[in-house]
Each structure stands twice: as structure tokens, then as C-alpha cells.
Image (cartoon, rainbow, N blue to C red):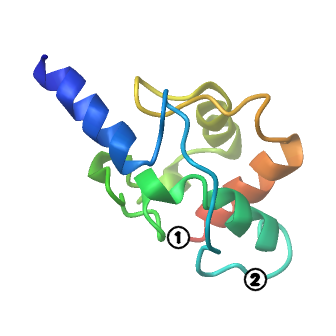
């Protein structure tokens, strides 16, 4: 087993994932609120928090930090969510609705 495959395995375990798919949420993420990206964004983000952390600082997979996410445009963030990134971030296109993606983008921009 190579170092890269060990790191990937640890990342997937830390994310609660099987086959690159984070587990379903079990409890609400902090900072829900109302309005665009509020409650729906917080609910959708629960699927992300295992890797990205409850406040976007990296969780069990520190390189998945969302710190400085504001440097990316909404379209860039959408592209990453829809298509995944590298070997550890799964693609969510077809698993999240357009409304869910828009809400989670607004939610993570508040970190």
C-alpha cells in the first residue's frame, strides 16, 4: 500500500465515506439561520462537515479547509461541488439539487 492510498483511505474513513461518498447528516450543523443559504445550506453542509469541519476549518481531513473560500467565485465553487476535486472530494452533481448547491454555497461563504 502506497502512502497516497493510505492517506486517501484515512480521508475517506474520516469523512464517514464509502466509495468516496460522505455519509448522511445525523445532527444539525451550527449557524443555520434563515434566508438564502440558511437552514437548507446548513442541512446540506452536514454532508460535508466530516471532511471540511463544522466551521470549514478542515475537520478530520485538514487539507479540506474552506478558509479563504471567498477567493473563489460562486461558479468556481459550484464547479468543485458538482464535479468533485482530486481523488478525495466526490462529485455531487445529480445527488444535490440546484437549490441545495446554491444554498450550501451561500452557507460556506459565511465561514
> Which residue reaches farthest top?
1
Q: How many marks?
A: 2
Residue 14 visible in this rendered orientation of the protein: yes
Callout 2–callout 1 Cβ contact below 8 Å? no
Residue 66 versus residue 57 in the image, above or below: above
Relative side of 66 to 91, left or right: left
Residue 96 % position (x, y)? 78, 40
Nearer the camera: disc 2 or disc 1:
2
Q: Mark 2: which secondary structure?
A: loop
Q: Is residue 59 above or below residue 6?
A: below
Task: Give the spatial CA distance, label 2 vs label 1.
Answer: 13 Å
Quadrant placement of the N terminus:
top left
Q: Identify the residue shown where x is 32% and y is 56%.
A: 60
Viewer can see residue 66:
no
Q: Position of residue 40 (x, y in %)?
A: 80, 65
**Residue that carries the numbered disc 1 in the rendered image:** 111
Res 35 label: none
Horizontal relation, residue 86 to residue 100: left or right: left
Residue corresponding to mark 2 = 33
- Residue 27 falls in which quadrant of the image? bottom right
First in residue order: circle 2 vs circle 1: 2
Q: Nearer the viewer, residue 38 or 75?
A: 38
Residue at image position (85%, 41%) is 97
Residue 21 image position (x, y, % from top left): 55, 35
Q: Nearer the viewer, residue 73 or 16?
A: 16
- Decide if residue 13 is on the left or right side of residue 3: right
Amino acid at each position: 500500500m502506497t502512502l497516497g492510498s493510505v492517506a486517501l483511505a484515512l480521508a475517506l474513513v474520516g469523512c464517514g465515506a464509502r466509495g468516496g461518498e460522505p455519509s448522511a447528516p445525523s445532527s444539525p450543523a451550527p449557524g443555520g439561520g434563515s434566508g438564502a443559504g440558511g437552514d437548507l445550506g446548513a442541512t446540506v453542509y452536514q454532508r460535508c462537515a466530516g471532511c471540511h469541519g463544522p466551521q470549514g476549518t478542515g475537520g478530520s481531513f485538514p487539507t479540506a479547509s474552506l478558509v479563504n473560500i471567498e477567493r473563489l467565485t460562486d461558479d468556481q465553487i459550484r464547479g468543485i461541488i458538482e464535479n468533485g476535486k482530486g481523488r478525495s472530494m466526490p462529485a455531487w452533481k445529480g445527488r444535490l439539487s440546484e437549490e441545495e448547491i446554491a444554498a450550501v454555497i451561500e452557507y460556506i461563504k459565511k465561514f
